Amino acid sequence: MHLRVLYCFLLVGTVAVFCKQNKGHVSVVLLGATGDLAKKYLWQGLFQLYLNEVNSGHSFSFHGAALTPAEKAEPLLFEALKSLSCPEDVPPDRCALVKDQFLKLTRYRQLKTSENYTALHQDILTSLAEEGLHEAGRLFYLSVPPFAYADIAQNINGSCRPPPGAWLRVVLEKPFGHDYESAEKLAGVMQTFFREEEIYRVDHYLGKQTVEQILPFRRRHQKFLDPIWNKQHVERVEIVMKETVDAKGRTSFYEEYGVIRDVIQNHLTEILTYVAMEVPRNLSNSDEVLRAKLELLDSLRAPEHSSAVIGQYQNYLAQVREEMEKNHNYFTNTPTFAGVLIYIDNTRWEGVPFLLVSGKDLDERTSYARVVFKDNAFCVHKQSKEETIKNSCQPKQIIFHIGNGALNFPAVLVTKSLFKPSLPYSQWQEASDVPGISFFGQPISDYFVHRPVQERDAYTALISNIYRGKKGSFVTTKNLLASWRFWTRLLENLNNETPRIYPGGEETITLLDFVIERGGLRFVSKEGLEVMGMDQNTNSFASAQSIFLGNPMVSNWAEPLIQQLAQDIQTAAEEAVKNRGIFHLALSGGSSPIALFHRLYKHHFGFPWKHTHLWMVDERCVPFTDTDSNFGSLERHLLQHVRIPYVNIHPMPVHKNQRLCDEEDKGTEEYALEISALLTNSSFDLVLLGLGNDGHTASIFPGSQDGITGDKLVVLSESPLKPTHRMSLSLPLINKAQKVAVLVLGKGKHDIITLISRAENKPVRWPIFGVKPNSGQLVWYVDYDAMFR
Ligand SMILES: *[C@@H]1O[C@H](CO)[C@@H](O)[C@H](O)[C@H]1NC(C)=O
Ligand SMILES: *[C@@H]1O[C@H](CO)[C@@H](O)[C@H](O)[C@H]1NC(C)=O
Ligand SMILES: *[C@@H]1O[C@H](CO)[C@@H](O)[C@H](O)[C@H]1NC(C)=O
Ligand SMILES: *[C@@H]1O[C@H](CO)[C@@H](O)[C@H](O)[C@H]1NC(C)=O
């Protein structure tokens, strides 16, 4: 720790100049100094920082740190530093000089024990005192796995805080948790040691040149964009990151994360906020930027079951088995591809689809955000080539091209039919050497194309922003949790979803193409059943008809199974209507029946909805507008799409007197009375049930006091899962039904199916055993995934 003051005159080479007044010393500590990220980007970023700031009046020292003793780590660190380079515009002799200085200012430190941290602190203080410098700040860059954060944080806070007056900045790398709960926990730990303004969470996409440019671009072209950046004019927004590489070599990480946690929750969501948020008045004000971002994140509409399509490249399973030493009984639902549909509930974006798409082992590597405008003009006069520029019949789009892809450089593209952009010319220029390609359906000559004058790496920009204390390009705790709130919900929805298997690379062809349909997404092509060894052409159901627990069982792959159940329900409905003019159907909540609802409204146009009464098997004690509400889900997935008289719809009265499921409100009695009044002998024509992993059915859980036996028709119950309070039909009431169908779907249900096939017939332990229709029929509908896995 010496030689630091030399920097002032060495800098300019032959001419010695006096230092500007020293503005204080900055110590940079890079933990994980010999890791991959450090070697690839961080040292280069720190060197670039030094190169830019060496004249700023601050003096610097750099400490590369890791757990390893110096003898072992120093050679590795030296290796990493050898390849540092300067941008093209720096003359070679200056570059060599500054690099030499940088190396002299850089030391390796073992940071393992709290004594090591104390020693670092002492060394910094001592050498500053010797050189008569005061301390400006300390920057700790944690390029280490998150499990190491807590220890390091404690050591920094406990023995390495700079003295009052100097700043502390602690930089964290993702992953920041893998769902809301873990992110909140990790954030909580950090907050016990650091103040919010001291924490810098890096999302390196925020340092990409094109991404950085989105807000300034929107501000700069406000005059053109204000009238069209909204639901009236924007058709859809696509935010895409496609990769050609697969997960080989890192499957143990990937198994836990999958594509949504790995890149969509963070990178793509950050881009989404920049495209969609309100542009704050002062872009240099980080607080304003972060607040506007948070507002946008808070207005994302809660995702639904159908908000995503997921896939998994074919080799993934074999790679996982090999790398994680799993045997052939191991299966995984981890998605390596996802397309997600997001709606934003504000007046600007209401109804505009935002598509977030990413995947591994795809046909090309590219990433971009693309805003497609509506085509709402009809041009009567035929178009000539010259006219196309201002012609309102040309497609209109703006593309923030982040990198790779056909263009192979970062760029902002605006179709000429929109307006001519002007970017800050010190940093961006009109691209001259554009390949003569077609780009998103238009010849590239139809666009104004701007590219950075000089390409630079994201980390260089971010490290500079950390040094300058510009928090706007980092992820705050509030924003992180707001993002996880949305994504955790989606991930939960996808829990039992089986990804579509795709061959990978060019061979995938159209298998992953998807469309937006009724507020959700679905793959265009039919499930590749042949992948699973089924003949797609036989239209007859290969349904296995057998006996399960003494009752008939229908089993098949999920899709044909649902088709059969839907058909069976329609048959029951027609029969009931023919005999008595009315059909009473009780439906369960949860995710399994959603596919059935879709099947019913999309294919059963002859269903006698007019004569059907819909009842709820169970309901969660939440308002109907809550996304957890079973009725809410029924409303979205079925009722909106069919013509059923309002008076035939019977939601459970969970919300009365402005409170939820209070016994005094007698909601259960009210529902029971309604049933007795309308149903002969309180007997439903058909009750649809599901089966929980703990053996529960309806909302009657193991150990329930009420609802398994007894006289009550409708009961309040408690679930071990949130939301914990429920209302449910009792099993004795269900047993009065003419027909009871139990629908069980997905690999996730395999264990419970196996278990109850062997378990003792005890309804208190496994409520599903309490389903024994008195004179009606019980039929199981179990898909192959649940049966055989
Ligand atoms: C770090 O601390 C350990 C235990 O106190 C000590 O053995 C080691 O020498 C220290 N390393 C350095 C570089 O001071
Ligand atoms: C952080 O450090 C301060 C001062 O050294 C100390 O008082 C405080 O207890 C530390 N915080 C935690 C959570 O350890
Ligand atoms: C914008 O914000 C920056 C940083 O907070 C501040 O220094 C600057 O004065 C603000 N500019 C205006 C016009 O308010
Ligand atoms: C209703 O119950 C009574 C008495 O148990 C029985 O006689 C009658 O057939 C039942 N009606 C129907 C429609 O099931």
Image: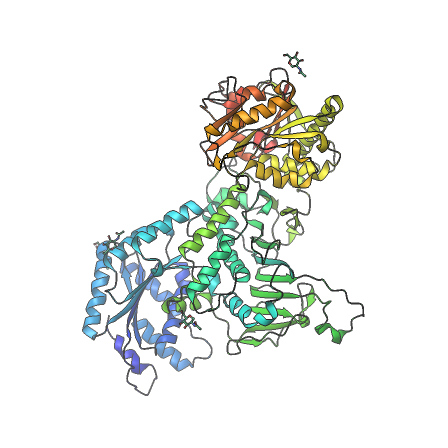
Residue 199 sits in which quadrant?
A: bottom left
Vertical placement of residue 200 versus 430, above or below: above
Q: Is residue 241 left or right of residue 578?
A: left
Ligand 3 rendered quadrant: bottom left
Vertical placement of residue 218 versus 778, above or below: below
Could you say where residue 306 lies in the image, as x and y percent from the top left? 60, 44
Residue sitting at 73 percent across and 35 percent down?
A: 604
Q: In this view of the protein, which residue sits in the foreground, 541 or 608? A: 608
Vertical placement of residue 78 versus 252, above or below: below
Query: Does the image show residue 697?
Result: no
Could you say where residue 769 lies in the image, as x and y percent from the top left? 53, 20
Residue 644 sits in which quadrant?
A: top right
Residue 480 sits in which quadrant?
A: bottom left
Q: Is residue 327 left or right of residue 19?
A: right
Vertical placement of residue 472 versus 749, above or below: below
Q: Residue furthest right?
A: 381
Residue sitting at 63 percent across and 40 percent down?
A: 637
Residue sitting at 55 percent across and 19 percent down?
A: 732
Q: How is the image coloured?
A: rainbow
Query: Does the image show residue 393?
Result: yes
Q: Quadrant of the C terminus?
A: top right
Total labels drawn: 0
